[in-house]
Image (spheres, rainbow, N blue to C red):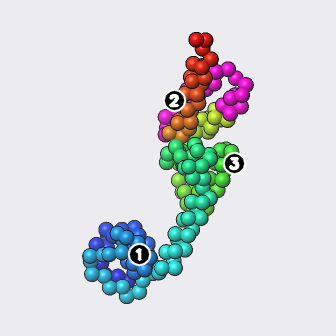
Amino acid sequence: STRCAIHQGRTGACRLFGVPSLSALGIPGLVECRNEISVLHGEGDENSVREWLGSLAALNQAIPGFDCEPFFLRGLNLACWFDIYFDSALDIDIFEDLRTIMWSIADFSDIKPNYVPRTNIREKIDKISILSLMLDTADAPAIRKLLCSIRDDYPLTGSYFYEEAQAYLDAIQTQEHADLPE
């Protein structure tokens, strides 16, 4: 147990691991507590903190990063993540993998009976799949129309695939200008 003058308002790191563990790891900004603390028996130790940080690092390695493919993951907002978590019909490989990872680390089963999808992310994903098939075969106006829909018709998906759609639109416009006779 510990004695702490700010026990109810202490930081999350302190709540999880205690000052001695944080001090042993040398985590700046979290190791010094101005309240007089005497630790009689701590629950956390340096090894448990290292294991916890290691599991977080492994989880981060399992999820594609913002700087690698598929780039579209960086635009997912919280509502999208919940839709992915609950919608098993989103069975595209990457979303199925993400859902499996999320299921392994968080249990929201008590929310599921009342959860209503809000983003229409599945419809947007379907259009993105159609886009990938159209890129080599369809004409520019058809592709432009689909891209504008992907970019503009799903505001609740946040910035998911927004930048990518805009980049495609810019490329089409650049190509069309290059094809104009001088």
> In this rendering, is residue 79 above or below 52?
above
Classify the position of the C terminus by image quarter. top right
Q: Do the residues labelled 3 and 2 touch (CB within 8 Å)?
A: no
Of callouts 3 and 1, the N-terminal one? 1
Which residues lie in the magenta part? 131-158
Hey, what amino acid is under mark 3? Asp
> In this rendering, is residue 127 above or below 95?
above
Q: Where is residue 135 in the image (x, y as percent from the top left)?
A: 68, 29
The answer to which of 56 and 111 lies nearer the viewer is 56
Tag count = 3
Indicate the quadrant where residue 133 lies: top right
Q: Real-space Cα distance between discs 3 and 1?
A: 40 Å
Residue hosting label 2: 152
Of callouts 1 and 2, the N-terminal one? 1
Q: Where is residue 15 in the image (x, y as percent from the top left)?
A: 40, 72
Residue hosting label 1: 26
On the question of residue 17 being in view, the answer is yes
Residue hosting label 3: 93
Q: In this view, does 62 lie to the left or right of 152?
A: right
Instruction: Using a 10 Å C-alpha cutoff, classify the residue at mark 2 as few (fewer than 14 neighbours), some (14 to 19) or many (20 or more).
Output: few
Q: Is residue 25 left or right of residue 146?
A: left
> Residue at image x 62%, y 17%?
179
Q: Real-space Cα distance between discs 3 and 2?
A: 25 Å
Query: SS for tag 2?
Result: helix
Query: Which one is in front in this view, the residue at disc 3 or the one at disc 1?
Result: 1
